[in-house]
Image (cartoon, rainbow, N blue to C red):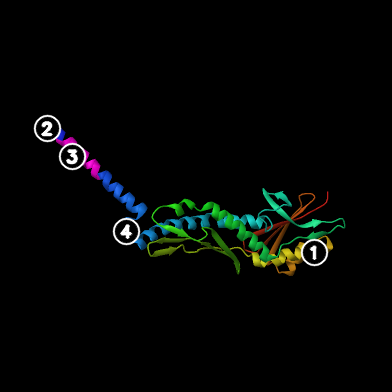
Amino acid sequence: MQKRGQVTLFVFLGLVVLILISLFFYVRSQYGFFVPSQDFLSSKASDIQQDLEYCVETEVSPLVKEFSLQGGNLHPTSFVLYHDSPVSFLCRKTNHGTCVNYLTPLGGMLTNLQNSLDQKLNACVNKKLLSEQGFSITGNKNVQSLVQLQGNSISVVSTYDVQLHRDTASMRISPVRKTIADAPLGELYPVVHDILEKEATAGTFDQLFYMLQKKGKYLIEVDRPYPHTIYRVYKKDSTYEFWFAVEGKA
């Protein structure tokens, strides 16, 4: 009986020691006890950084595609549903057989994409990571993106305005860059403009003649779900498409 009691005591003491060790490492990890401030901040910043990188990786490409298939407008108010996408009317019909060109300037399109991307990213990032114990936070705690055209690519740089502090140490979150390599929006925009100008002034557009003029560099497909017209514009050897609609009168 005495031997069995000794075994039970050793098991109990072992459990206590194990619990204390686990508690020590938990407190060390969560609150940074006995950890140099810079090392502790580096660990916490790494979690926030990885979270931002995940959001940029998962949100940017689908949003750019949606933007392109909806006529450069992620929240269209005037559109036709085509292949499950709300394709914006970039030319609205008048009573004279032509239409009014509503093409947004390219810079305005990029600003709209940028604003929508910021909304997506700020909804995606885990803000609970900013409220953990052991450090303080400065900054507006929001993600802000810069969207630019670079040749045939769309470049996105997303910056998280967050700075971690503990004692005299501090650390920022590095900007995250994402490039959509096959996205020649800058080249397609003038093509879209040419089409809309013809539709607005002449009420029609000769796609075959235009493609011959451009020596097959740009391809234009036309669909006519009555009474509207859908244009699908893309560059040869590219998978990136820009869709838009011209309103028709029933």
Q: Secondary structure at mark 3?
A: helix
Mark 3 and mark 2: span between their CA atoms? 12 Å
Residue 61 position (above or below residue 186): above
Query: Between disc 1 and disc 4, whose residue precedes?
Result: 4
How far apart are the two marked residues, 1 and 4, measured between alpha carbons?
68 Å
What is the CA distance from the residue labelled 4 to the residue labelled 3? Answer: 31 Å
Q: Residue 172 in the image: x percent, y percent?
A: 45, 63
The picture quadrant where one finds residue 153 is: bottom right
Residue that mark 1 sits on? 198
Classify mark 4: helix, strand or loop: loop
Query: Disc 4 or disc 3, which is closer to the eye?
Result: 4
Residue 213, compared with residue 60, is above or below; it is: below
- The quadrant the N terminus occupies is top left
Number of other residues with Cα within 10 Å of mark 1, as a class: few under 14, some 14 to 19, many 20 or more: some
**Which residue is identified by label 3?**
10
Q: Which residues are magenta?
A: 6-17
In the image, what residue occupies the spot 67% across and 63% down?
108
Residues tagged 1 and 4 counted as in contact (Cβ below 8 A) = no
* Picture disc at residue 111: none
Q: Earlier in the sequence, mark 3 or mark 2?
A: 2
Q: Nearer the viewer, mark 4 or mark 2?
A: 4
The residue to which callout 2 is attached is 2
Tag 3: amino acid: Phe
Return the residue at label 4. Answer: 35
At which x and y percent is residue 226? 79, 49
The residue furthest right is 96
